[in-house]
Amino acid sequence: MKTLLEVKNIKVFYNQVILALRGVSLKVDEGSIVTLLGANGSGKSTTLKAISGLLSLENGRVAEGDIMFEQMSTLGKPTVSLAKSGICQVMEGREICKNLTVEENLKMGTLIGNVKRNERKEAYEVIYRYFPVLKERRNQTAGYLSGGEQQMLAIGRALMTKPKLLLLDEPSLGLAPLVAENVFEILKKINEEQGTTILVVEQNASLALSAASYAFILANGKVVMEGPTSSINTHDIRNVYLGAASTKDQAS
Ligand SMILES: Nc1ncnc2c1ncn2[C@@H]1O[C@H](COP(=O)(O)OP(=O)(O)OP(=O)(O)O)[C@@H](O)[C@H]1O
Ligand SMILES: [Mg+2]
């Protein structure tokens, strides 16, 4: 299978001094769903931000290593140009524009992505097919949507860029279990039907393991376990999390 994304041994610093990633390597095959798991503070969001180019907004920098997307280095490229090449991150904390309508939010996606003017109408219809509730609410102010609907809108907006690689940071955060399962079902469908490759960070390990085919587990800024999701169980992950917590305790 073709490798779409390869993160090669990256070290990331914030503010020149805080070492958040201590040499992270991972690969994502084209057309796959891969999950990145790990305890709080292990470096999951930092890894995604390094890939999507959002690190620079937080004074973060990839100091060593490289990130290859379709065999080209992405380092130093701004987020907007990475979005044009097909990398799009759904923001943590549902950063939709709450005072715009649902459809206006979706429109923002088309402004940075690859959708040509004459393809836009079809692009909305695709999103509305996956998320019928967004169609019902298309003219409503996004701030009045429920948490789950706002998350769907955030994913829909990212899809409006027609990404090759969709990055998601904790899509189940704050959602009721059934709603979270629903979001993952839709992600699986989008992966199957649109061929969108997905790299998803999750706290809910069992949900992510059931959707993904491959998993990487981070602890203290390094990958400590990886493999096909069929070979990883939540018990192993629990041990990694607890191990990470105890090394941190010893360090402090
Ligand atoms: N903007 C920032 N400035 C300084 N340090 C940061 C910044 N963002 C993250 N860090 C630090 O980098 C490390 C990794 O953080 P990161 O947010 O990537 O972890 P995470 O695995 O996403 O955690 P969580 O599960 O809590 O979201 C942590 O030690 C964190 O304190
Ligand atoms: Mg995070």
Image (cartoon, helix red, strand yellow):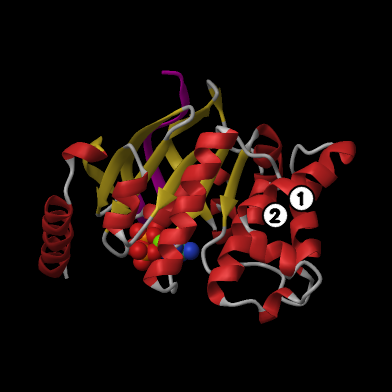
Is 169 situated left or right of 70 in this image?
left
Local crowd at mark 1 within 10 Å, few (<14), some, or many (≥20)?
Answer: many
Local crowd at mark 2 within 10 Å, few (<14), some, or many (≥20)?
Answer: some
Q: Which residue is drawn at 51% across and 39% down?
A: 191
Q: Quadrant of ligand 2?
A: bottom left
Question: Compared with residue 137, is residue 201 higher up or lower down, i.e. above or below?
Answer: above
Q: Quadrant of residue 45?
A: bottom left
Q: Which residue is drawn at 44% across and 72% down?
A: 175
* Region in magenta: 1-21
Q: In which quarter of the image is the N terminus?
A: top left
Q: Is residue 13 magenta?
A: yes
Q: Distance between the residues labelled 1 and 2?
A: 6 Å
Q: Do the residues labelled 1 and 2 touch (CB within 8 Å)?
A: yes
Question: How far from the left and from the top, in percent, is residue 251?
Answer: 15, 65
Q: Which of 177 and 94 is in front in this view?
A: 177
Q: Quadrant of the C terminus?
A: bottom left
Q: Nearer the viewer, residue 126 or 90?
A: 126
Q: Does the magenta stretch include residue 192?
A: no
Q: Residue at x 76, y 44 (%)?
A: 123
Residue 124 circle label: 1
Residue type at mark 1 is Tyr
Question: How far from the left and from the top, in percent, is residue 196?
Answer: 55, 36
Residue type at mark 2 is Tyr
Q: Residue at x 71, y 37 (%)?
A: 84
Residue 128 circle label: 2
Question: How far from the left and from the top, in percent, is residue 90?
Answer: 57, 55
Question: Compared with residue 210, is residue 105 higher up or lower down, i.e. above or below?
Answer: below
Q: Nearer the viewer, residue 181 or 47?
A: 181
